Image (spheres, helix red, strand yellow):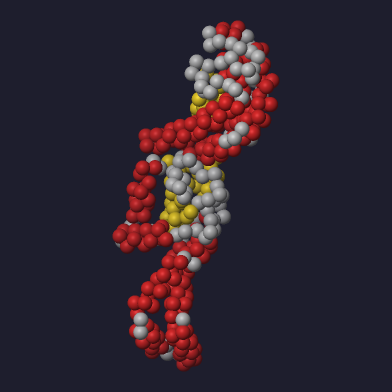
Amino acid sequence: MDVGESLSLWRALEETSSKLTGFVKRACEVLSLDTNVDVLVSLEYIYENPEYQPKICGYYDPTKRLIVVSLPCLMRKDLKDGLAETLAHELIHHCQFTNGRLCSVHISTEEAPKIDRAMPYKNRPHEIEAYAKQKELANTLQGVEGFDDAVNYVKRLAMSEVRLPPISEAIRAQVNNPLLEETAKDIVNLAREDLLSVASEILDIRLCEIEDETARKRFEEQASSYLQKLKEEPVKAILEDIKRDVETFLKWDVEERKVKTLIIDPATEQPHCYLFLDNGIAIGFDLKGSYLPLLPLLLKTKDQTLSLKKLGELSFNLTIEEILQGIFRAGSYEFELKILPQEDMAKNLSNELCEDDTKPRIKKLMSMIFLLSYRSAA
Ligand SMILES: [Zn+2]
């Protein structure tokens, strides 16, 4: 991991921490507790006390009024219940140090370290009270407004999930793109009265190229019914042609190709995933309905055998551990994983488009057209 990746990761942690702080402050208002408290989400593996059961995934620092929660620890439990219980336990400690009414044990920051030195963890009065009251308070917390939102935020950082729409849906959306009808209208307007004559000239040239008598006859029939249609409903006839060409191109040059790289960009208003194929073409997908990662990610396939079709069958559940290790596995496929700094996103997209390219400008242009024109079906 380089400095840029590390800073992006810290920003995601900061963002999640501030989301949790907002929730905890609201909960303090509801519970009539001192609202001067912050939450910090940590990637370190922390238990309040490693030997004692049930384990609490965090701790409270009374001098800083800070609740630290451990993401790797929470991931070993049910995230929702684990988070509620850890926050509840630490909020009871917060109550004890700030004279709240929710707790009956009240201690000072001077007294606490003495108790900690003098008594075993499970016999300390503030711990006995925290463990006794945490369950009920956890239930209350789950009912406080914003809890689910906070859980989802933590989830996005801990184990995000990217669901790609099936490629067939993307192709269908592309074929039914309203822009194609606009193009058909433009062609008809541009050609005006020359449309029929130009079309029949082209058909005549093709007819001359056919040697087989039966094939010639069949083509002639098709050509005449096509010209008839072109005369009656020119836009419809041209649109059908364009749709067929687009579909053929997408099926052969897109669907059958191998995937090189994926870039997941969760930070924009409409989150996207960009797929880069081995022929230099890129496709942009709208992402919705998933717990997207908080961080922009780049996934590069290690072997070049993953087809676009196959990719649609893979599930992308990215855990924070995989992000830290820089390796992600889905099925039998392995990806090299990197965090992308948000500010370098455009540069990275462009780099991927131009990589090992003999005709960079043409491919880049093609790719950009795909990226710009794709909108998933509603
Ligand atoms: Zn405790």
How far from the left and from the top, in percent, is residue 8? 41, 37
Q: Of 339 and 133, which appears nearest the observer?
A: 133
How far from the left and from the top, in percent, is residue 171? 49, 64
Can you say which quadrant of the picture contains the N terminus? top left
Q: Is residue 315 left or right of residue 220?
A: right
Q: Is residue 218 left or right of residue 92?
A: left
Q: Is residue 278 left or right of residue 145?
A: left
Above or below, 299 against 325 in this view is below
Above or below, 298 against 13 in this view is below
Q: Is residue 320 visible?
A: yes
Q: Is residue 205 visible?
A: no
How far from the left and from the top, in percent, is residue 357? 33, 57
State the residue at coordinates (50%, 61%).
170
Above or below, 378 against 79 in this view is below
State the residue at coordinates (31%, 58%).
360
State the residue at coordinates (36%, 55%).
353
Above or below, 40 against 106 in this view is below
State the residue at coordinates (42%, 90%).
211
